[in-house]
Amino acid sequence: MSNEETHKSKSKLALAVIASAQLMIVLDITIVNVALPSIQRALSFSTSSLAWVVDAYTLVFGGLLLLGGRSGDIFGRRKMFTVGVLLFAGASLLGGLASSSALLIAARALQGIGGAIASPTALALVASNFEGPKERTEALTIFAAVSAAGASLGLILGALLTQYLSWRWVFFVNTPIALILSLSAGKILKESEKQKVPSDLLGAFTSVVGVASLVYGFIHAAASGWTNSITVASFIVAAISLVGFVLRERSAKRPLLELFLFENRNRTGAYLVMFLVSAALFSLWFFLTQFLQDVLGYSPLKTGFAFLPMTLTVMVLARNGAWFMKKFGALPMMIYGPAASATALFIFSNLNSHSSYLTVILPTLLLNATGLGMTFSSVFPTAMTEIDPRRAGIGSAMVSVSQQVGGSLGISVLATVAEAGVASKVRLLSTSGVKSPLAIKVASEISGWTNGFRAAALMALAGTIVSVFAIRSAKRPQGAPSAIAIAVEG
């Protein structure tokens, strides 16, 4: 085998390890959703506490992503990638063996810690292991594809495991995969150069407390209201911590979040678009999954497969993202992507009990898929524009922070909007003489979900507006590459 063939073979293996880890981490955001009823029965969760099976993961994940990205820069990305994946494996095993609700929630939080270390280091490893412009672009597009499609695949895999094995296999399945990835990483992936920088412990503390308090505030508001004392206190703590974090990062010699990342308008725009689209996207899985089961009567497995056409379309488009970037450039893709998703969500805001999967839901899912494919294909390379490879860890962490915090905040805000819609519809139907509890329940739930879709559409639309005003090709002398060209070409 020639040196070139050996290099290509090793590059494919490296990409397989990196992409598989990202897929496993993204899958876990939704894989437990269809297993929640079984988990509730097995471990005696209350209705209100059941949400923490999902929230414990996203809360810790979002709060620690910046610290996880920086850890790779300081200690070595391959090393921290392996640490994160092994922690994820152990936490998954603990979750599958959980005998109480408290133990399962603790395991989900540990999974969040592992994911917060492994996800940003996985993306940063692309910079360490793919030096050629063409292969780096291909690696980024595949990474984008699994990030875009992973959550939908999680619904399918979760349904299959729950229906044919047990809810515990939703967690057990991660352990052997993670162990194989951790063993492969040491043999296949290149280690990055370690940076000797002082630890920004104060920055780490304020960022974790700030993000966690903000997400918790929205989660608590959905259950207890905006005026609840704990809700208000959470937002106050979040505001103080996040302001303190920004002030700390401005004065620290080597900050946890280097503010130079926001000096480039393309990068900043990409972060905002990722944040807004992710916030909107999470409503699709959360609300539409319930609509398909509670209104159309789908089984969990059928519900999971209902998302399959969207998933496949996203993967095909994102896999060819490099071609789209070269043909059209980032700006048209980042305008079309959020706009298409916003249109799809507006259509979903008109769902009713007579809406057909084939004539309404499927075409709208495919429209949304084109939006997601274009968005993710352009956001990932644009967000890495003009970043020094030595700082790729923190740069990639910001992409993951935008995605995960956007998703966590989005679902908590949209759940609050949906709850308000449910309460309003219940009051309206009760005073209009409707006596059937089932009719009131179904109509009020649909009203809540459609309210949530409408709010999500506005979030995606805001992503389109950000793209129009933020994403630009850099002004340059004739013959010099643009910022977007640099992102695509490496």
Image (spheres, helix red, strand yellow):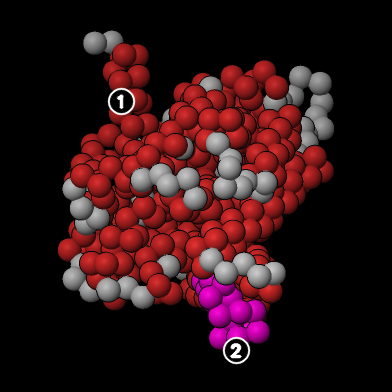
For the magenta stretch, what is the residue range?
211-233
Q: Few, some or many C-alpha atoms within 10 Å of disc 1 (few <14, some 14-19, many ≥20)? A: some
Estimate the spatial distance between the alpha carbons at disc 1 and disc 2, rounded to whole Å: 55 Å
Residue designated by label 1: 10
Spot occupied by residue 461 in the image (x, y as percentages of width and height): 74, 46
Q: In this rendered view, identify the residue nearer to me: 206 or 55.
A: 55
Spot occupied by residue 117 in the image (x, y as percentages of width and height): 39, 56
Residue designated by label 2: 229
**Quadrant location of the N terminus in the rendered image:** top left
Instruction: Kindly identify the amino acid type of the residue bearing the numbered disc 2.
Output: Ser
- The residue at 71%/33% (across/down) is 336
List the single residue furthest toward the bottom.
229
Q: In this rendered view, identify the residue nearer to me: 30 or 374.
A: 30
Spot occupied by residue 324 in the image (x, y as percentages of width and height): 62, 22
Element under disc 1: helix
Q: Quadrant of residue 430?
A: bottom right
- The residue at 27%/67% (across/down) is 41
Instruction: Kindly identify the amino acid type of the residue bearing the numbered disc 1.
Output: Lys
- The residue at 36%/75% (across/down) is 46
Element under disc 2: helix
Spot occupied by residue 306 in the image (x, y as percentages of width and height): 44, 37
Q: Few, some or many C-alpha atoms within 10 Å of disc 2 (few <14, some 14-19, many ≥20)? A: few
Q: Quadrant of residue 239?
A: bottom right
User: Which of the two discs, 1 and 2, labels the residue nearer the N terminus?
Assistant: 1
Q: Which mark is residue 36?
A: none
Queried whether the magenta region covers residue 221, the answer comes back as: yes
Prevailing secondary structure of the magenta residues: helix
- The correct choice, above or below, for 88 with respect to 305 in the image is below
Q: Quadrant of residue 370?
A: top right
- The correct choice, above or below, for 246 with respect to 191 in the image is below
- The residue at 42%/67% (across/down) is 51
